[in-house]
Image (cartoon, grey):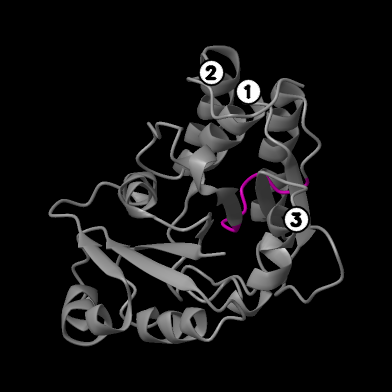
Amino acid sequence: MKLSVVIPCYNEKGTIREIVAAVKNAPFEDKEIIIVDDCSSDGTRAILEQEIEAQVAKVLYHTVNLGKGAALRTGLKAATGDIVLIQDADLEYNPKEYADLVRPIIDGLADVVYGSRFQGGRPHRVLYFWHSVGNQFLTLVSNMLSNLNLTDMETCYKAFRREIIQSITIQENRFGFEPEITAKVAKLHCRIFEVGISYSGRTYAEGKKINWKDGVRALYCIFKYNLFHTPQASTGLAAP
């Protein structure tokens, strides 16, 4: 079974080499690594062109900075694996946990798996109180409208059967991707599992990009895609 790892990247010159090495060494034999550079301006593109392109399956470049959702739209469309997994280009999420994350899909139990930062006993860096409150609030509102019982809707670590994720048109260009995709897989009646993961969050000084405006947008997206979105064509899933 082939795993496609999609890495959206924007101004990550300090971590891009390390994360690519970690993904290459992750415990999954057949991997397709796809990096989408969202018009980085800090030297990341030069590193990708001169060092990384030869090490991975594909490096795709945006000529204009569009946002994480747009980068994922590009990368997910290019994936050819049986399972598609999203990996941030920083070092907050550990590729050593891929095997646990995709296991429910391999075992035929799940169509989609979320890696939860708030579930299980793995280590977590202690950081911003209000970020954790915001994440839990957004997850709560999302659950109320989608009728799911997720513990971490905003997690980066999401794995999908390829036919599921490629059947969905991603509209959000920035961090609204998370509530959008959650609403859409819920409406498709996907079998969704959660797996506890570790989390080594970074500070704004270390390069964290999400801010309060993205939280407001996420709340808007929860209502927009849960209440006003019509499910797309059939993906081969059985009716609930």
Query: What is the distance, in whole Å, between disc 1 and disc 2 at their CAs?
Result: 6 Å
Which of the marked residues, 1 or 3, is nearer the chain's N terminus? 3
Judge from the rendering whether residue 20 lies leftward or rightward of residue 93; answer left or right. Answer: left
Q: Is residue 120 above or below residue 43?
A: above
Magenta segment boundaries in residue numbering = 151-157
Mark 3, Cα crowd under 10 Å, few <14 / some 14-19 / many 20+, is many
Residue 143, labelled with which disc?
none
Instruction: Please name the residue that numbered disc 3 is placed on.
Output: 104
Which residue is identified by label 1?
A: 187
Residue 24 makes an appearance in the image:
yes
Which residue is at a point 66% across and 37% down the rendered structure image? 138
- Label 2 belongs to which residue? 231
Q: Nearer the viewer, mark 1 or mark 3?
A: 3
Amino acid found under the numbered disc labelled 3: Pro
Q: CA distance from mark 1 to mark 3?
A: 20 Å
Q: Residues within 10 Å of mark 2 (few under 14, many from 20)?
A: some
